[in-house]
Image (tube, helix red, strand yellow):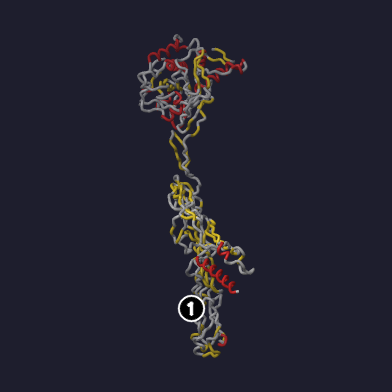
């Protein structure tokens, strides 16, 4: 025995514990606590991996692949010092039968093969649905974990569970190298402990493989388990004569790999040490996540990379092994119909509940739920207005309208006013008729056989109904004539007639405005309005397309530069102006035969403005053309007229200045002035 921080442990335990130690910052602990913490904490990390183990069968029953895959990156909490076997870690399995076995009741140690990994076995034994367990599990590196107390019955060999202790070993029976020296040695030491504790022999009498027990279908531990070497180590340990009695000093197994991808495992002075590989890229075993990294020995931080939302409120969406899962649930939902209540999910679909009840109690309306609101529509047909003195009541405008009154005739044509009792519906006797009050269609005399005598047959009368016209007297009655036509010709009004006369009420229904170039016509405030048809022909080279009688007209070109000397055209929305060789108009009224040169209109030949009149001054203005100003005469004409009065219009030395003509000279004008001048000369000669 040795003392570690006040705790006495066997030397053999110390050697086993040292192999599992991990590095801790012992400098931060008091000296009196370092050894305890160094052993207790340091051991724990190496036994923390997850997922299950299947009891070895005949090579066809393995740990579920999904369980095995997930196990590689999970970490278990450790509980050293709680196991029956000192060097073992304690992780409790729920799969066992409580008992109180001891020496004499435990007679056999059973050797198993996991048919999987050490991590997977520990996790599988923790799964209640697995319904399998063993007392101990040993890894290839020699780590030992106890999962069922020895006094209790583990579930590993069926009907033989009651008297056995089961030891599972990591590996596969088909692997020739599965039984590593480190694992065999650790198992031999554990079996040595059990043989001594329960008074057994180190022989096949009390140490058996799973396949050797009665009523078993398994083949483990198989032909590659080194029985001879194994039993020799157990025997030497029991006798205290062999190397199996315990190591003299700490030694590392062939591999210090603790199976945790998030620890760095090394051998230091014969002791396996593991440190957290924080920040190391890892995989958490979930194909639905990515970007995981190690933190405190665990693979964490993976982001979900697959969107499994099916937008169905009746399923719980998830992701497993890279595949989306959608589990149906039974919860309240909304089927999208506001007229159903208490909708509920069923088999992954939202099923509408009860229909909203819409009943306004009016027999003249049909009630329905539309968009979650109760909507009533007026109906036609018979109804009961509640008055026993009316018959043939009918629905009009959503109201029950009283029909005709009960015929309360006492058989005497000279009595009137027979009435129906509103309570009993029975008729009462009438009063003597006054024929003078019954209108223009009767006389004031009542005949006991026929009643009031008729008068004015064929004459116009008023029946008091504003909805009738052309009423005339006929057999003592004012005949109803014909119905008044209340149609105002407006498609945007509802036309009807009531006691006040014609009603033309606007509505907001589709209509036809009579315009072929509008569509989606609808009534707005009793006016039919439509939307103008868009006539864009999609050609960027045209503009101002318009609709004429329902047809879109071609647009105008957008490239006219107003220059007669260019040919304008548009290509793909771009204007082009090609120079022309042709006649043109230079806008100068003083030139003719203008022509294009390049893109410019060149002036042509000047026009001749000479009107042949010696008494006019001829000139040309570009904006007006030829002008002929009167007031300049030839010298010989001036000599023939040397004297004149102040009003004769002729001065000494030539023609007197006259107002300028604003019109071009013409032969007629010239002849007229010549005649006037001749008359003046002739008159003066006579004087």
Residue occupying the far top of the picture: 241
Q: Is residue 340 left or right of residue 215?
A: right
What element does badge 1 sit on? strand
Q: Is residue 262 visible?
A: yes
Question: Can you give x and y, in whole percent of width and height, for residue 621 in the image?
Answer: 54, 57
**In the image shown, does 341 or 88 lie closer to the viewer?**
341
**In the image shown, does 255 or 666 lie closer to the viewer?**
666
According to the image, label 1 marks what residue? 482
Asked which quadrant contains residue 684, the reply is bottom right
Residue at point 47% right, 44% down?
A: 312
Residue at point 61% right, 18% down?
A: 28
Question: Can you give x and y, in whole percent of width and height, for residue 452 in the image?
Answer: 52, 88
Q: Is residue 551 above or below residue 277?
A: below
Asked which quadrant contains residue 60, the reply is top left
Asked which quadrant contains residue 132, the reply is top left
Q: Is residue 96 visible?
A: no
**In the image shown, does 214 or 412 lie closer to the viewer?**
412
Quadrant of the rendering where the C terminus is positioned: bottom right
Mark 1: few/some/many CA within 10 Å (<14, 14-19, 20+): few
Q: Is residue 591 above or below residue 674?
A: above
């Amino acid at each position: 025995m040795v003392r570690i921080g006040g705790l006495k442990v066997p030397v053999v335990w110390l050697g086993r514990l040292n192999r599992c130690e991990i590095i801790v910052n012992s400098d931060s602990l008091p000296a009196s606590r370092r050894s305890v913490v160094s052993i207790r904490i340091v051991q724990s990390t190496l036994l923390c991996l997850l997922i299950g183990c299947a009891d070895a069968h005949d090579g066809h029953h393995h740990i579920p692949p999904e369980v095995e895959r997930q196990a590689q990156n999970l970490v278990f909490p450790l509980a050293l010092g709680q196991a029956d076997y000192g060097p073992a870690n304690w992780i409790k399995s729920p799969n066992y039968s409580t008992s109180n076995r001891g020496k004499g009741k435990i007679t056999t140690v059973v050797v198993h093969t996991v048919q999987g990994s050490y991590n997977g076995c520990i996790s599988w034994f923790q799964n209640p649905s697995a319904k399998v367990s063993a007392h101990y599990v040993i890894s290839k590196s020699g780590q030992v974990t106890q999962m069922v107390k020895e006094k209790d019955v583990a579930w590993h060999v069926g009907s033989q569970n009651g008297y056995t202790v089961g030891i599972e070993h990591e590996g596969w029976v088909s692997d020739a190298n599965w039984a590593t020296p480190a694992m065999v040695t650790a198992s031999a030491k554990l079996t040595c402990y059990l043989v001594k504790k329960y008074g057994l022999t180190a022989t096949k009498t009390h140490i058996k493989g799973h396949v050797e027990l009665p009523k078993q279908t398994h083949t483990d531990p198989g032909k590659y388990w080194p029985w001879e070497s194994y039993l020799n180590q157990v025997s030497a340990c029991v006798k205290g004569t062999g190397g199996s009695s315990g190591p003299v000093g700490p030694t590392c197994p062939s591999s210090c790999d603790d199976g945790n991808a998030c620890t760095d495992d090394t051998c230091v002075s014969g002791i396996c040490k593991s440190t957290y590989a924080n920040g190391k890229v890892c995989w958490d075993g979930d194909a639905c996540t990515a970007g995981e990294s190690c933190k405190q020995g665990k693979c964490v931080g993976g982001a979900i990379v697959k969107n499994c939302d099916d937008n169905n409120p009746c399923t719980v969406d998830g992701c497993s092994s890279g595949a989306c899962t959608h589990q149906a649930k039974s919860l309240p939902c909304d089927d999208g119909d506001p007229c159903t209540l208490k909708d509920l999910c069923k088999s992954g679909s939202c099923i509408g509940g009860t229909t909203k009840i819409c009943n306004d109690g009016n027999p003249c309306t049909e009630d329905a739920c539309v968009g979650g609101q109760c909507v009533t529509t007026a109906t036609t047909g018979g109804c009961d207005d509640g008055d026993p003195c009316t018959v043939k009541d009918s629905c009009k405008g959503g109201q029950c309208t009283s029909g005709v009154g009960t015929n309360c005739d006492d058989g005497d044509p000279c009595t009137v006013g027979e009435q129906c009792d509103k309570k009993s519906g029975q008729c009462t006797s009438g009063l003597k008729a006054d024929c003078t009050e019954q209108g223009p269609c009767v006389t004031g005399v009542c005949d006991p056989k026929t009643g009031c005598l008729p008068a004015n047959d064929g004459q116009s009368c008023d029946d008091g109904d504003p909805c009738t016209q052309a009423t005339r007297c006929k057999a003592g009655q004012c005949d109803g004539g014909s119905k008044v036509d209340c149609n105002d010709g407006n498609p945007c009004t509802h036309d009807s007639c009531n006691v006040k006369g014609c009603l033309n009420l606007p509505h907001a229904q589709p209509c036809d405005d009579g315009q072929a170039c509008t569509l989606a016509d609808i009534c707005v405030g009793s006016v039919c309005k439509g939307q103008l048809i868009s006539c864009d022909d999609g050609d960027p080279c045209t503009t101002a397309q318009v609709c004429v009688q329902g047809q879109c007209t071609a647009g105008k070109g957008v490239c006219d530069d107003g220059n007669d000397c260019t040919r304008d055209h548009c290509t793909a929305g771009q204007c082009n102006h090609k120079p022309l060789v042709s006649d043109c108009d230079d806008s100068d009224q003083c030139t003719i035969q203008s022509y294009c040169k390049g893109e410019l209109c060149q002036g042509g030949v000047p026009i001749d403005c000479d009107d042949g009149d010696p008494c006019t001054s001829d000139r040309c203005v570009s904006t007006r053309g030829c002008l002929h100003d009167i007031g300049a005469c030839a010298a010989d004409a001036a000599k023939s007229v040397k004297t004149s009065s102040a009003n004769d219009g002729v001065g000494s030395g030539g023609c007197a200045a006259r107002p300028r003509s604003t019109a071009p000279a013409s032969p007629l004008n010239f002849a007229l002035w010549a005649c006037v001048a001749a008359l003046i000369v002739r008159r003066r000669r006579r004087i």
